[in-house]
Amino acid sequence: MRVTQGMISQNSLRNIGKSYEKLSKINEQAQAGKRFTKTSDDPVAAVKSLQYSTALFRNDQYQKNLSEARNWIDTSETSVTEIIDIMSNVRDKVLDAANGTKQPEDLAAIGVEIGQMKNQIIDAMNTQMLGKFVFNGTNTNVKPVIENADGTYTFNFENYTDANAVKSNISDGITLNVNSNPLSAFGGQSASGQNVIEVLTNLENSLKNGAFTNSDEVLGNVDQFKEVMSAERSDLGARSNRIDLVGSRLTSQYEVLKNAKSDNEDVESEKAIIDLLQQEVVNRAALATTAKVIQPSLVDFLR
């Protein structure tokens, strides 16, 4: 086959076009800092990058769930600790009232103090986080304890079941109960079937009337309530520790994924600049060579 000057020129121009395309691509990479700016540049790397992005998004969501779970558990643990401390003070007052030297007015004064402590416990029972009641499971808009106009109480927390547990996905395949079981957090029930508020209300009224004859029973109830509350606090502490461990693992995983994504799609700025300069040299050389090749001769005009 006879190779004409026109064929040589077309081939040279085609090569220059490819060279410019490569230069343009390297220039885009250098400016964007990415190995590819569209999927067609590197389909395999683009798919991997999408997978890394999805994993990073999921990891970030887990960390947000974890943060909310930590706040919920820490708030619950703080309130349970407050109730236990108040119950310790109640115990001291019961011992003081039972020492056999108190006059009716002295017992009445202690009764007033018991009433104040009871109100403090109710406040702790109705603890909220971001406007949600933390001690009533998924019924976060329902107050656990309501004081009625006639001085009685409505104990909504006693309707709690495991079905009301607040659960959170904190990692792949890991779901954690983030709420405290109010039946345990508030000490359960006494031997006579009363909750802590009912026992304290009876104690308050008895002392205000200047009479107190069942100190052993009350002390037994107080100790039992505290024991159940302490067990719930320990459970909350264990869940808090688990959150810390999972959080540490998620943070490490996030860094690994972020670095892998960067390695997959980022270009080193120094290398990109060198590649760009080298390609510019190649382009200039190609242009110079082509200019010589496609120069028309007298013979070309005579044909």
Image: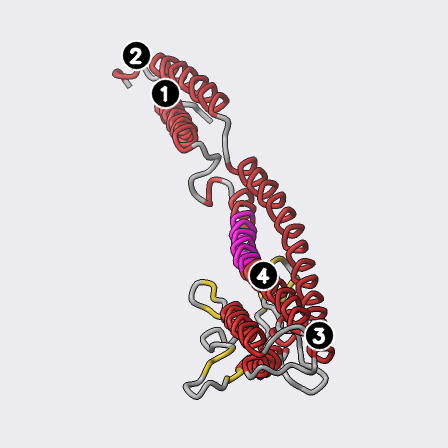
| N-terminal-most mark, 2 or 4 | 4
For this rendering, which residue is in front, 182 or 163? Answer: 182
Q: Which residues are magenta?
A: 52-71
Residue at the disc numbered 3: 219
Q: Mark 1 = which residue?
A: 5
Q: Secondary structure at mark 4?
A: helix
Residue 238 at what x, y percent from top left? 69, 58
Labels 1 and 2: the sequence-earlier one: 1
Q: Residue flagged by tag 2: what amino acid is it?
A: Ser
Q: Nearer the viewer, mark 4 or mark 3?
A: 3
Relative to residue 249, is residue 277 drawn left or right? Answer: left
| Dot 2: element | loop
- Say whether residue 68 is magenta: yes
Locate residue 199, reporting x and y percent.
Answer: 62, 81
Of the numbered discs in the image, which one, if any, rests on residue 27?
none
* Residue 48 position within the rendered picture, expressed as x and y whole percent measured from the top left: 56, 46
Q: Amino acid at mark 4?
A: Ile
Residue kind at label 1, given as amino acid type? Gln
Distance Cα–Cα, label 1 vs label 2? 10 Å
The residue pinned by badge 4 equals 73
Q: Secondary structure at mark 1?
A: helix
- Is 227 one of the magenta-colored residues? no
Among the two numbered marks 3 and 1 on one chain, the one whose residue lies closer to the N terminus = 1
What's the distance in space between the residues labelled 3 and 1, CA to CA?
Answer: 111 Å
Judge depth for marks 2 and 4 and give the one in front: 4
Q: Residue lying farthest left? A: 301
Q: Label 3, label 2: how many angstroms apart (C-alpha)? A: 117 Å
Look at the numbered discs 1 and 2 and tell me whether their residues touch, using CB distance below 8 Å. Answer: yes
Q: Mark 2 sits on what residue? A: 297
Question: Mark 4 to mark 3: distance in Å?
Answer: 29 Å
- Look at the image and tell me whether residue 137 can be seen: no
